[in-house]
Image (tube, helix red, strand yellow):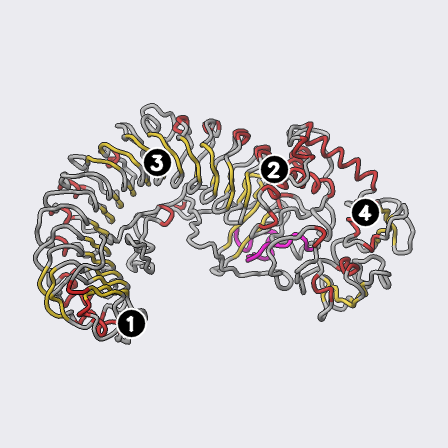
Amino acid sequence: MSDDTPGYSEMECHDDVPDSSLPDVEDALRFAAGQNSQANERKRNGRAGSFVSIAIAVSLVFACVILLVAGNRPASSSRENEDSAISGRNLQNIHGICSGEATPCDNVYSPTMCTNVGSTTAVCDAVSTSCQATCARASLSGFESPCQCRQESCVGFNCDYQFSCVGGTPSCQEFADPVVCALTHGCRWVTGSGASLPEEPENAPLSETHFRGRAEHVKSYLIEQGISSEEDLSNTGTPQQMAMNYIITGTSGPGLGRPYIIEVPDGDLTTQSGYDFVTRYVLSVLFYALNGQRWVFFLNFLTPTPVCEWFSQLQYADLKTEHRGVVCDFNTSEVTQLLLNQNNLQGNLPTELALITSLATIDLDTNLVNGPIPDSFQDLTNLESFFSSKNRMNGTLPSWINVWKKLRNINWSSNLFSGTIPANMGNLEELTGIALDNNLLTGSFDGLFDTSNATGLKKLEQFYAENNRFTGTLGENFLKDLANLTYLDISDNRFSGQVPVHLFELPSLLVMDLHDNEFDLLPSEFPSNDHLEFLALHKSSYNSQSIPSSISNLEALRHLDLSQNGFTGMMPESLGTLTDLRYLFLAQNDFTPGDIPQWVLGLSTLAELSLKSTNRTGTIPDNLGNELQGLVLLDLDDNNLGGEIPLSLGLLRNLNVLLLNRNNFTGELPDTFSNLVDLRLLYIEANAELEGDLGALFCENPRFAINPVIIADCNLCYSSDCCTQCCENGEACNTGYHVPDLDPMWQLGYNRVFFTFQREDYFIKQNYEDGEEASTARLPPG
């Protein structure tokens, strides 16, 4: 939603919990103002603007610009219980707060709270700094009510009135909030002169009799309409009981502003009054069930406003904005979206949420939500998108998922779901995105996504099922003939058999990630394909099989990883025709011994090249550094290369990782290495006849802002403590393969973010400067 959206005077971003205990000062403290605003659906980055991007939170730190209407936000992030409402707060200089110079009223919610602190002079900041008032426990000298400043109305209540308790109970001035007194002891409204009013103002506190009657009425309605069970409503501390009390009193605690009383409807949920009442109750249950008191952003929940105003419009340091909270339909005022992502939600989803049948989008991404998907959710027949990635949800996937006939996007990745995928998921006709990766799911795909039988999937664009425990083979009709399928990732499972050739015929597929499975056979002939950009087949079992030369038919490839597979034969020369390659990993295959192929030098766009453990012999081509100047990673470890290291490697100014270890290099270290100022890792040990001084080249070189990690033979480290580790007598003391392996993640756009070795060494992110990675994964559209 843009800055000029009607009803939005300012965009706000908060780095702590918006404090629900602030008095209700209209047009001042609402975190996102506006009556019946039409909230735009949260947009997610994507190809042609149609995809939703998950906020992958490598970090959950928000850099925010905080635009508050009046003053600074409090540092505290959670609301306290009623009995400790003023403890530890510093709400100075915020609308509606009594403040003064070092007075006890600095830490109170509202001027009424000053009556509990003691006599002091305070400034009522909400209306006018000239509005002076004396707060006193024993008297209300100068006041017509505890919240009134003489000159103008102040905070939270209509200050033309004060409350006097009847029946011999204490005066309401003894309480932190007159409303609490009114609800618990019974109060009557009087004017400042003591004359009784003929009628109570709107949303006035209830008499004791009225209060008790309302409590019984609310509870009976919730039980009779099947909203919540009597047990849940009766047990102290349940989300249902706390939400019911909120509905009864119209406030969630003392000092929290004027009450918002909504009448108990005569009709059921099909009436407008029934829908409004139940929706307010259900969202209150959700708040308490998911530990709303500790949310990062309070999102205006439980404020005395219609539920369509329970949201915040967040603005970040880069001036981007994001709508969080409730979204309503502009015309019907029905709740259509719940956007609660990245908000420290904790607990189980309440079954009552299914009563808001108008919901089309639920976004709970990146929280701490537990438990299964409630069976009651099958009543959400208008649901289109359900995002709950990066939580702790468990149980099995709902067997009734096919009742969500409008469902377009599922993102349940990075949870603890187990069991098998329901067979009827393939019948969902509107599905465009499925993300079930990083769970504990089992079973095979045999017939599961067989497009010859499934009635749905025709619109599917993204399928993510990596890092589970799936087994079996992929059938001849697995995801076949899906014209829109763009991203396919089933890596890190236990699939076996042949990689189906028809997957390479999908007309829109950009990314195919099948790595770390048990596939043992590639297609004998790759079909012509001018759109597939990312192919990861590493860590499988293609032992004693040669790489088909027809792999060059995949002419648009930019990322090709065939490492750690046991391939034999020659490195196919046809790979040299893939001139768009930026990432080529052929490491740890048993190729026929030979030199570094000349065709490699023609791949001028390469950023990462790994020929580790591929039986390379001869020397490094003298012009390698001239031809491949964009390299960020060069891995020639564990070969039989010899001769002198060419001076041209000093031209690789973008190089982060250089692995020349476990070879037979001779002569002096090139002095051009002093130009490799971005180098972060150098392995050069186990080259017994290599000479030179690494200290002079790197650690004593003032051009290096950060010294690289260096493992080398000790004779190269003699003049300084430059080497992280040195190896005696040319021995390989740095054991292990140290494959700089890319475990591609769709959440990160299949881009390199850090280098990971077997010892879990992490290095800085390398941003390629000549354009965005082509194989950028997107989330399902929202």
Mark 4 or mark 3: which is in front?
3
Verify CB contact (< 8 Å) between mark 2 and mark 1: no
As drawn, 658 above or below 390? below
* For residue 324, side relative to residue 416 (left or right): right
Q: Amino acid at mark 3?
A: Arg
Verify CB contact (< 8 Å) between mark 3 and mark 1: no
Q: Within 10 angstroms of label 4, few (less than 14), some, or many (20 or more) residues?
A: many
User: Which residue was labeled with disc 4?
Assistant: 182
Camera-side residue: 432 or 693? 693
Q: Position of residue 660 (x, y in %)?
A: 18, 60
Verify CB contact (< 8 Å) between mark 1 and mark 4: no
* For residue 216, side relative to residue 32 (left or right): right
User: Which residue was labeled with disc 1?
Assistant: 704
User: Which residue was labeled with disc 3?
Assistant: 469
Distance of mark 4 from mark 3, alpha carbons?
A: 60 Å
Q: Amino acid at mark 2?
A: Thr
Camera-side residue: 540 or 47? 540
**Nearer the N terminus, badge 3 or badge 1?**
3
